[in-house]
Image (tube, rainbow, N blue to C red):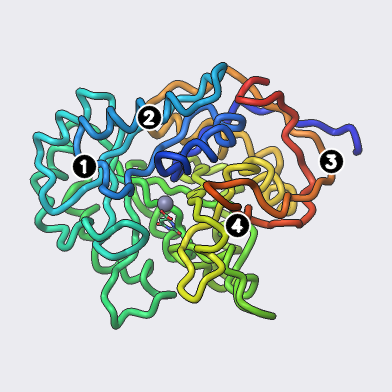
Amino acid sequence: MNNKTLTLIKPDDWHLHVRSGAALKSVIGMTAAQMGRAIIMPNLNPPVTNAAQANAYREEILSALPKDSTFTPLMVLYLTDNTTPKDIQEAIDNNVVAAKLYPAGATTNSDSGVTNIAKLYPTLENMQKLGMPLLVHGEVTRNEVDIFDREAVFIDEVLNQVVSDFPELKIVFEHITTKNAVDFVCESSNNIAATITPQHLLNNRNDMLVGGIKPHTYCLPVLKRAEHQTALIDAAISGNAKFFLGTDSAPHAKHDKESACGCAGVFSASHAIELYAQAFDKAGAMDKLEGFASKFGADFYHLPRNTQTITLKKQDWAVPASYPFLDGNIVPFMTTKILGWKLAHTQHGKE
Ligand code: DOR
Ligand code: ZN
């Protein structure tokens, strides 16, 4: 048992925040050491709303990578009320792979997001025509809707309508957190897929709130009750290709999380694949990890699967208390906890 290893096709992260500037430099090497590619979220300030900005951001990421890295950032357009069908064409011409719908006010840097999806219909029409996937932060933002219900209400009020109005549109329902979302994806056509984060597989809202509030487990959509966690685990280990890896690793400095108004975001880039291995092993499903982590996402995006591999070793190790970040620290998810699998790798994305 001690010497047990598992070799996988190199995974990809289909939902990742890496920020820009000094923050980007602090975190990008960690993802590059684990993942072949990542879908780069465009919620910068200002957001990445056109092809020129996406190109500039791609260049910034590439130049922040460790020298020998083969990591590929996959760029995403941030949709606003003013995104046009032409913006979509230009994005595709510049190798932007998807566009992201943030309902205005849903989360970090979403103020420029979409206020009414109906305004975007000509743009969605063109995405459907051109085969560009729509990535969805699936929460309504109306004040009167309870934060724990916002994903389920989004399915009822928005997503059902979009799917019926655009039956050929490829949609990734990002970072799903509820049984409602799992059922919705299972019952939809093969154009609809979902990403699942490590925190929603390993934690539920009790982990965040019982015995004192744990700000480093707070993200959006927020952790839900245990029965939802169970539904997410069942979906991830099911072998259903509609569910794949997307960490939503979202770096915020320690002091911004441990604050009277703490930022939403869980940081997992440093040990993402080990976190997923922990969840899959606990569920007795290590044989299902490779499909979820390394195959299904690439297939959905019509990209080739990676040719490199990574090897995980069965070995207990403690997640560090923190990593350097900007002028201070960042606290990783499951900080100081023991995980049962460790990535065996040389630095910077080489096996
Ligand atoms: O928790 C989150 N943090 N959820 C998001 O949707 C955005 C992210 C961030 O950018 O910090
Ligand atoms: Zn995100």
Which circle's residue, 4 or 3, is located before the other in the chain? 4
Looking at the image, tell me whether mark 2 or mark 3 is earlier in sequence order.
2
Q: Is mark 2 within 8 Å of ligand 1?
A: no
In percent of width and height, residue 80 lies at 18, 51
Q: Are marks 3 and 1 in contact (CB under 8 Å)?
A: no
* In the image: residue 2, left or right of residue 59: right
Contact? badges 4 and 2 (CB < 8 Å) = no
The residue tagged 4 is: 201
Binning the other alpha carbons within 10 Å of mark 3 as few (below 14), some (14 to 19) or many (20 upward) gives some
Q: Residue furthest bottom?
A: 144
Q: Earlier in the sequence, mark 1 or mark 4?
A: 1
Tag nearer the camera, 1 or 2: 2
| Residue 49, numbered circle | 1
Q: Which mark is residue 60?
A: 2
- Is tag 4's residue or tag 2's residue first in the polypeptide sequence? 2
- Quote the CA–CA distance across marks 4 and 2: 32 Å
Cα separation, mark 3 vs mark 1, equals 43 Å
Question: Label 3 belongs to which residue?
Answer: 315
Could you tell me how far apart the alpha carbons at marks 2 and 3 are, in whole angstroms? Answer: 36 Å
